[in-house]
């Protein structure tokens, strides 16, 4: 099930999980968003879910210089 959410404020505790060839989805990212130095990151932020609930969550996303942040995903809730 795909959850839709809105990011509220800044993401904190950001860490790089994988870079370029270590990202399993690298071919798909390049096809849909373009070539770049892709990185997969994780961090903690507050999100508003589609039902209006506000929760603290661990987020994962991809980003590349010149392209920006793409494909945010809630991995787990922290509260």
Image: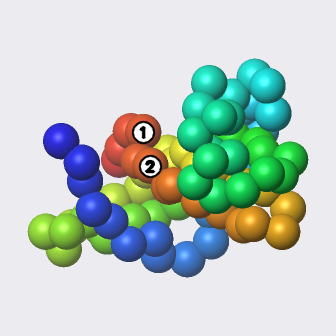
Q: Nearer the viewer, residue 30 or 24?
A: 30
- Residue 22 sits above or below residue 60 on the image: above
* Residue 28: percent from left, percent from top: 58, 40
Q: Residue at x 81, y 33 (%)?
A: 19
Please give left or right for residue 57 compared with residue 14 in the image. Answer: left
Q: How many numbered callouts?
A: 2
Discs 2, 1 touching: Cβ within 8 Å: yes
* Residue 53: percent from left, percent from top: 21, 67
* Residue 18: percent from left, percent from top: 75, 30
> Whole-Å distance between the Cαs marked 2 and 1?
6 Å
- Residue 27 sits above or below residue 10 on the image: above
Q: Secondary structure at mark 2?
A: strand
- Mark number, residue 27: none
Q: Is residue 12 visible?
A: no
Other residues around mark 1 within 10 Å, as few (<14) / some (14–19) / many (≥20) = few
- Residue 57 sits above or below residue 51 on the image: above
> Where is mark 1, residue-wise?
75
Where, quadrant-wise, is the N terminus in this rendering?
top left
> Where is mark 2, residue-wise?
73
Q: Secondary structure at mark 1?
A: strand
Which residue is the extreme one toward the front? 31
Other residues around mark 2 within 10 Å, as few (<14) / some (14–19) / many (≥20) = some
* Residue 34: percent from left, percent from top: 72, 56
Question: Residue 16's quadrant in the figure?
Answer: top right
């Amino acid at each position: 099930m795909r959850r839709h959410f809105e990011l509220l404020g800044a993401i904190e505790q950001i860490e790089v999980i994988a870079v370029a060839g270590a990202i399993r989805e690298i071919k798909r990212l390049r096809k849909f968003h373009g070539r770049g130095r892709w990185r997969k990151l994780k961090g903690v932020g507050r999100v508003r879910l589609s039902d209006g609930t506000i929760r603290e969550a661990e987020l994962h996303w991809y980003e590349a210089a010149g392209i920006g942040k793409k494909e945010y995903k809630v991995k787990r809730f922290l509260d």
